[in-house]
Image (cartoon, rainbow, N blue to C red):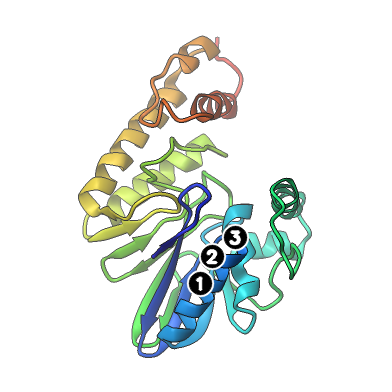
Amino acid sequence: MLQSGIWQTNSSVISAGGAVLVVDPAYFPRELDAIAAAARAAGQVAAVAFTHGHWDHVMGHAALPDASVWLSSVLDRAIADDDPRAAQHLADARDFDGRWYVPRPHGHRWPTARRAVADGEALALGPLTVRALHLPGHSPDGLALRIGGALWCGDYLSPCEIPFVDDAAAYRATLARLRGELADAVEVIPGHGPRLTAAEARTICDEDLAYLDRLLAARDATAAAAIPLPRAADVPGMREHHAANCAKVGPPRP
């Protein structure tokens, strides 16, 4: 696992039988060069995988131009249809790079060699089987990968941040599904932060389930705003994300 200087964003190089899968290569050019070098040293790069379409996870595919990109069928459809959300992810990357003078020699674009992955689909990586899970809630297009006892879960279960909610009910359902996956997992690689034991991930999952349950049960905006954050309360921006989560739940109930 390699970790970017932005938001502790994780990139993984997985090698089996000479075949290599790179998950979420991120983010700065020198980091992408190091990821590509590590991948090529490990074998033949068979694929890149996106856990979801947010800009900090998808810009690195150009560093491995010969690899097909695995992504959820939801994200693949959004790209093919030129969905405004998919276009916004590229615009967000372009804006960040422009503000911080980050060179992006290959531009800001989606991969053309894409492999849409269905929920529950099994994919081969050399002698290993990679099982895919669709995980909506943080975004509509979330994709987890399970290889044996290891679980790559994208932007869920991070010890660095609270849940960033796109759809609260879907997010809760995804956490419940992840709780089941953690029953026989050994380690978890979240999108941001350190690698976790299954026990550590279960603790975070339970905290986030309790947070989402309280958010969904709140009877008005004042009650929702008063819900304590499950962690990272001192991290700049987390309280603003909590306010955004409250708004996602919908209008106050009478």
Tag on residue 28? 3
Classify 10 Å Cα crowding around label 3: few (below 14), some (14-19), many (20 and above).
some
Tag on residue 217? none
Cβ atoms at labels 2 and 3 below 8 Å apart? yes
Residue pictured at 53% horizontal, 50% vertical: 6
Vertical relation: 244 (above or below) 169: above
Residue pictured at 74% horizontal, 70% vertical: 106
Residue that numbered label 1 is attached to: 34
Q: Residue type at mark 2?
A: Glu
Residue 159 horizontal/vertical position (percent): 36, 42
194 left or right, relative to 44:
left
Cβ atoms at labels 2 and 1 below 8 Å apart? yes
Q: Is any part of residue 72 visible from this angle?
A: no
Query: Which mark sits nearer the N-terminus, 3 or 1?
Result: 3
Q: Residue 144 appears in which quarter of the rendering?
A: bottom left
Which quadrant is home to the N terminus? bottom left
Task: Between residue 182 and residue 58, name the one nearer to us.
Answer: 58
Q: Is any part of residue 163 visible from this angle?
A: yes
Q: Residue type at mark 1?
A: Ala
Q: Residue 102 appears in which quarter of the rendering?
A: bottom right
Residue that numbered label 2 is attached to: 31
Vertical relation: 179 (above or below) 131: above
Classify 10 Å Cα crowding around label 2: few (below 14), some (14-19), many (20 and above).
some
Residue pictured at 45% horizontal, 77% vertical: 38
Vertical relation: 79 (above or below) 227: below
Indicate the secondary structure of the residue bearing disc 3. loop
The answer for how far apart the CA atoms under marks 2 and 3 are is: 5 Å
Q: Residue type at mark 3?
A: Phe
Task: Between residue 143 and residue 250, name the one nearer to us.
Answer: 143
Vertical relation: 193 (above or below) 164: below
Which quadrant is home to the C terminus? top right
Residue pictured at 32% horizontal, 42% vertical: 205
